[in-house]
Amino acid sequence: MSSPTPLVELRNVSKVYPATVKGAPDVTAIDDVSLTVDAGDVYGIIGYSGAGKSTLVRLVNVLERSTAGQILINGHDVAGLPERELRPVRLGIGMIFQQFNLLNSRTVARNVAYPLEVAGRDKSARAARVAEMLDFVGLADKAGAYPDQLSGGQKQRVGIARALATSPALLLADEATSALDPETTHEVLELLGRVNREFGVTIIVITHEMDVIQTLATKVAVMDQGRVIERGDVFDVFSNPVQAASARFVSTVVKGVPSAPELAVLRARHTGRIVTLAFRDDTVDQTRVFGEFSRDGVAFQVVYGGINEIQGRPFGHLTLALTGEDATIDAALDRVRAVTTVTEVR
Amino acid sequence: MFDSLIDLLPEFWKAAFETLYIVGLTLFFGGFGGLIVGLGLYLTRAGSILANRGVFGVLNVLVNTIRPIPFIIFLAAVQPLTRAVVGTGIGNNAMIFTIALAAMFAMARIVEQNLLTVTPGVIEAARSVGAGPVRIIFTVLLPEALGPLILGFTFIFVALVDMSAVAGYVGGGGLGAFALLYGWRQFDPVVTWAAVVLIIVFVQLVQFLGNWLARKALRR
């Protein structure tokens, strides 16, 4: 079976900036990254600032030039295209920004019309499309306003309307909610979700906020020092992060395994044995796990952790303090080990 | 006390008109040239959309070399060039060429600085929808920097009035020549001050106009 051509495919892409000072080493912003984004995906790329995510997303629409590797959009390598030939490529890729980047000298409507002007649409076609897009983002009444009269959330919605005006198949969102408060962030993420579902637009989301990934993305890649260190379905990465950096990101939205200082506090407060159990929806039955303890009369108390849900699938870690006979506890733990991962902290 | 001034009124108005003529044309040519050179500086600097070290270096050195030369020395120094271009090294038209040339480089720096106030992200947004350099200049850079640019042109207007006053030295007219010839040399401060007052009025009017236009452009 041949799979359809991915919408975006990066093959061994690198971006090296020559040293600014003579004698200093070159700076590798992107280090041999390969990534496949299929049509319809909401692909999250997460990493700390300086990890190279913003550079990576700019390689996709060639705002920045890669220094090695291939960048395939619908199977066509765009990495080496001259600036002039990038125009049609960019018309098929919308982009929104952390600072919105609206033209302050233009009204909301004329901002949304801008890509249509570049695309050479005539005036009536532009007006119709602008009205349609402003309606979609819920800003039809702000058509004549200027960007400096809008709130941050409204500005980003204009940004989204502008990015989608030419009906691109792909939307790049570069920290699109990082300048917004939590409530507005939620609204914008909701809107981006609709963009994906209603228009079928594939979205690449760059963020350092794990809850953005949790709300919006279906797949995620974790970046660190210019490399993709972990990738996969959001549920898999969230429920079972392999790399330390990924685990740190996951821990920002869901309390997982207690850290060393947190453990010390737990130790001081609880006399029993402390174990951490991993839960994943289809594989672990909570009722059964707790049943194993109570069956043998092992007293347990949940002292740390949390259960979270992604795309309707629960997952998480619970840390328990167990009290009872050592042998009984061991026997119960052995049975629990058969269904889930148990980590005992001594 | 005002007798001599009243006698000189025809000359006075003629001089005022000449000042406006010189300043108006130099503002046009110098401003236009300044816009081009300023855009050149902005567009070719490292990291900009037409980054080009060589071109930027040449423009930068040129601007830095010409800008600090005191105007009256510049006037003498470029006279051979003026003669070659205008056909004469003296008179109003020679003056206009020289002032426009000097103003062009002064204006270039101001234009460059004003363009630098445009957020790079906005240019990136324009690039991301496929806009090329020419479109970016006319639809992003100039409109976004319009307010500061108007203030920059207003600022340079004052410098132009200043430079135009030196025209008297090379057989040109204008209020500078008038004040020099009929005021200073005739020991008639009233005549000198009449020129001063009119220049202040010009400058105030233009400053007011510039502020008003800039406010309109910035919608504040």
Image (cartoon, coloured by chain):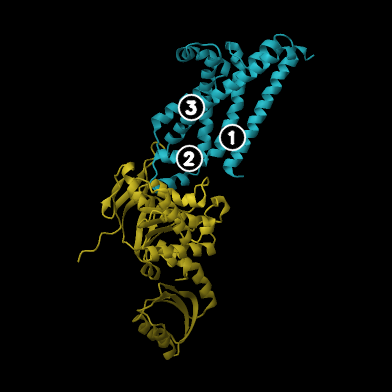
**Chain letter tied to yellow:** A
**Same subunit under labels 3 and 1?**
yes
**Where residue B141 is drawn, which disc sits there?**
2
Identify the residue at the far left of this view: A1
Q: Residue at x 42, y 51 (%)?
A: A124
The kind of residue on which mark 3 rests is Gly
Residue drawn at (46%, 67%), measured in percent from left and top? A251
List x then y, in percent, for residue B59.
45, 27
Along the line of sight, which residue is nearer the eye, A190 or B154? B154
Does residue A213 appear in the picture of this structure? no
Q: CA distance from mark 2 to mark 1?
A: 16 Å
Task: Give the labeled residue for mark 1.
Answer: B151
Disc 2 marks which amino acid?
A: Leu
A118 relative position to A180: left or right = left
> Residue at 31% across / 44% down in the picture?
A85
Judge from the rendering whether residue A63 lies leftward or rightward of residue A75; answer left or right: right
Badge 3 density bin: few <14, some 14–19, many ≥20, Cα 10 Å: many
**Pointer 1 indicates a residue of which chain?**
B
Which is nearer the N-term, disc 2 or disc 3? 3
| Residue ID at (43%, 29%) | B57
Label 3 SS: helix
Q: Residue furthest front?
A: A124
| SS for dot 2 | helix
Q: Position of residue A205 (x, y in %)?
A: 41, 59
Q: Colour of chain B?
A: cyan
